Amino acid sequence: MNRRYRKTIIAGNWKMNKTITETKEYAAEMREILGKPKWCEAVLLVPPVNLQAGVRAFKDVKISIGTENCHYETSGAFTGECSAEMVKEAGAKYVVLGHSERRAYYNETDMDVNKKIHAALRAGLRPILCVGESLEERELGVTMEKITYQLKCALAGVTPEQVRRIVVAYEPIWAIGTGKTATSAQAAEVCGAIRTLIRKTYGARVARSMSILYGGSMNAKNAAELLSNEDIDGGLIGGASLEPKTFLEIINASNQD
Ligand code: 13P
């Protein structure tokens, strides 16, 4: 983390978990235990159907609300999809784009992710852009090639002003939901390389102010060490965000002095 230049963000990605009732219960528990996060912005990314109820339930809890995907068109014949404008109006501040689960299970391409980034920015959302390599790619030594490719595609046509609204999350696919976290050194190396790439394309100021998160089996035990790296500005947390107490421990890990 480097709190002088950029925001620390602890974001929970609920994936396909929690009903509206469970969302309200979570908020009620958090209201009791959270207080005011000292240094970070805490965020929960919830299924779109939970957005309105979530925004209402977390109104007096210091947690921002976002969602996990959006379509790139404004409206039209896309059964089952939600546009960026729809999730924005339902109360989302952030939207996760390019998550590896969407790339793997719904065939989302890098070009789709690029269109979604533009749609989200147009709608006034803050995209959390996910990039990351598979185990095979890491073992072949092409991690940075993969991440460079993903970033260049996703950010094509995005202006420096717009990039300031984007958060990047480095999520090695092999670390997601596996209990296998990247070592602090591995995560820091890639997050640092992402910042270098942003610097080369958009300049030092934009790179310095960008929040770059790590995601992949981050939990209350490993959070403090990961967050102690200068280039890791927070976390994108799946499983460990589903229980208020565990999520709070990770928020607190970002409050270290
Ligand atoms: P886990 O924390 O469950 O590994 O999930 C990480 C993730 O995919 C967050 O987007």
Image (cartoon, rainbow, N blue to C red):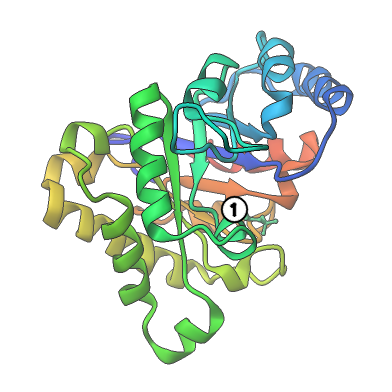
- Please name the residue shown 52% across and 67% down the image: 172
- Front in this rendered view, residue 211 or 18: 18
- Front in this rendered view, residue 146 or 107: 107
Q: Where does residue 12 sit, x and y in percent of width and height?
A: 64, 40
Query: Element type at marker 1?
Result: helix
Using residue 61 as the reference point, say whether residue 204 is left or right of it. left
Q: Is the residue marked by circle 1 packed among few (<14), some (14-19), or many (20+) residues within 10 Å?
A: many
Q: Residue farthest to the front?
A: 77
Amino acid at dot 1: Ala
Res 87 → quadrant: top right
Ligand 1 visible in quadrant: bottom right
- Please name the residue shown 65% across and 10% down the image: 59
- Please name the residue shown 53% across and 48% down the image: 235
Res 219 → quadrant: bottom right
Q: What residue does disc 1 label?
A: 223
Using residue 33 as the reference point, say whether residue 189 is left or right of it. left
Q: Where does residue 49 sit, x and y in percent of width and height?
A: 73, 27
Residue 247 appears anywhere in the view:
yes
Q: Where does residue 118 sit, x and y in percent of width and height?
A: 33, 37
Res 67 → quadrant: top right
